[in-house]
Each structure stands twice: as C-alpha cells, then as structure tokens.
Image (cartoon, rainbow, N blue to C red):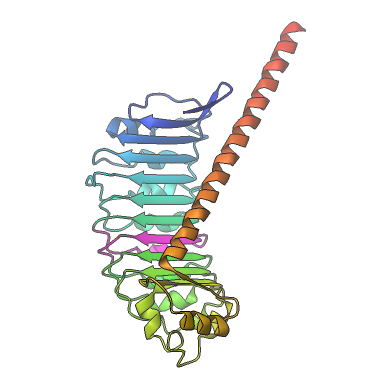
Amino acid sequence: MFQFGNAITSLCGFGGLTTVSPHVESITLYHVDAQDVAFFQSDRDDHLCHLHELDLDLSEALALDPICSVRSLRKLTLSAMNFFDITVIPESISNLEHLEYLKLYYLKLRSLPAAIGSLSNLKTLKLIVCRGFRRLPDEIGHLRTLERLVISHCEELEELPDTLGGLANLKGLELFMCLMLRRLPDSFCHLQSLEACMVRATRIDRLPEQIDQLTQLRTLNWAASILAADPGFEGMGGPLPESFLNLEQLTYFGCGAIAPSVRARLCAALPRLEVLTDDEYYARRKREEAEEAEEEAQYKRERGEREGEEEEDEEDDDEEEGDA
C-alpha cells in the first residue's frame, strides 16, 4: 500500500476488500472471491470514479460483470493462477469505454466476446496461457486503436480471423507457443503500421507471401528453420522482399549461434540490420522491460509527491482561513 498525504491512491493486498479511499487510482488483489468482485458493482456515479488500474488474481469461478461496471478503468489484468473455470469474459466489457490495456492470463477462455470490438480506446491486448482458447472473434478487426497484440502459450489456437487486417494501427504482433496455428490470414499483409513481428513455436512453416507489403516493418523475430527455408535469407539465393530493406533487427529463434558468414551476408544486403540470436534478443528485452518498470515507478513517485504537496497547500489554506 502506498499512501500520499492523507489520500491512498494505490492498494495492494489479498481479498476482503470492503472500503477504499475515494482517491484510489490503482488496486491489485490476490485470492479474489465473489464478495470481492461484488464490491466493484455500484449504481453510484462517484463509486471508484478515479480507479484507472485493476489487477485481480481470481480464486474461484465467478461472474465478472461487476468489474465491467467500473467505467473509469484504463488498465485491466485478470488471472486465475489455479486455472479456475473462468471460461467467459462478459459482453458487458463494452462498458469499459476508456480501457487502453487488457491482459488475460491463466484463464480457461475459449474465445473473447464480440463486444471486445467496441473497446474504441484499447491499445494493448495480451492473451497468455489461456487453456482451450481457439480463436479470436471477427470483431477484433474493429479495434482501430490497437497497437500491440500478444498471444502466448495459447496452445489450442487454430486460426486468426481474416479481419486481423483491419487493425490499422497495430505496431507489434507476438505469437508464441501457439502450437496449433498453421497460417496467418491473407489480410496479414494489410497491417500497414506493423513495425515488429515475432512468430515462434507455431506450425507456421513459411513467411507470408506478401510480407513485402509491410513497408513499416523494422523488427522481425522468426523461427530460424523458416528463415533458412526462404530463398531470400540464409541461402541468399533470391531477392529479399523490398520492405526488408527497412529492417533494423532480425532475430533467429531456435539457433544457438548464427554463422559469421550468414550474419555478414545479411548485413551486407540490409545495411541497417542488426542480427540477434535467442539469447541476445531476450537479454535486450530484459533490459528494456527493467527500464520501462523503473520509468513507471519514477512517474508514480513523482505523481505522489505532487499530490502530497498539493494536499499540504490545501491544508495551509484552510488553516489561514480559519485564523482569519
């Protein structure tokens, strides 16, 4: 729990939530039960009206509609570490009109509701270790503001909808450990804003034929076996897709080392390119994530200091008025 002045803006703890400060902006709860979820339901307009971030680890199968009544939410993370039978995200998720970030992990979801397409401010969607998850709804293509889509360890995902190409602002796509996924939709080439693409541990066995249309692509992280089979890469037996001239980072997944001759040929053909192995890529990601976490922590510290100073100024003004 972090407390600034007399206003608690962030709460972190276990279940049993009964009351919170009207100033609370962030709540993280573990072992959440039905009573905890019911707390979020209210007809009052000022109930949790400043709550922007909510992270819940659910301890039993329960309905999630009360959570979807907190219209001020911008960031929502839902998990059930013990894989309780939470198989449905309710259609009422459409109430979260300000939501920018949605992470669902360790759930038994089979799909997402069609209402997901109405989240007009959503920028990041992550589906991680969702057992039984087979497909995204066609309405996913309505998410015009979506910038990052991550699907990881959803081993029963069989296909991506052709509406994927409607994600006009998608900059990052990550598909990892989707063991039943055999192909990308034809509309993949319509992702004109795509800058980074990672595909690893799937059944996709070739690069998309029209990948040269992705003119904004800067980072390509793909299985080494697929890149080696492409005539434009390892063998250098054919022309590289024109869009690859903009590549700045290429990661070969599934190989311990890259032959110096291969690295040299690729860098000669693509002068802006940096070629990485698995270990090099993940070491960089770890550093970047640590830097991002520190920036967020610093932002929260500075915000807390500002709020504390503002509250002290208000108290001083009240004292002066009382003396007067």
Q: Nearer the viewer, residue 75 or 269?
A: 269
- Regarding residue 43, the answer to whether it shows in the image is no
Q: Give the quarter of the figure containing the C terminus.
A: top right
Residue ID at (46%, 87%): 232
Magenta stretch: includes residue 142? yes
Direction bottom: furthest residue: 237
Residue 143 higher or lower than 320, as above or below:
below
Q: Residue at x 57, y 37 (%)?
A: 300
Name the quadrant containing residue 208: bottom left
Give the image location of residue 277, x and y in percent: 43, 69
Please say whether residue 162 is visible from this viewpoint.
Answer: yes
- For image coordinates 51% across by 54% down, the residue present is 287
Region in magenta? 132-157
Q: Is residue 177 above or below residue 108?
A: below
* Left or right of residue 317: residue 123: left
Residue with the most extreme front position:
260
Q: Nearer the viewer, residue 267 or 188?
A: 267
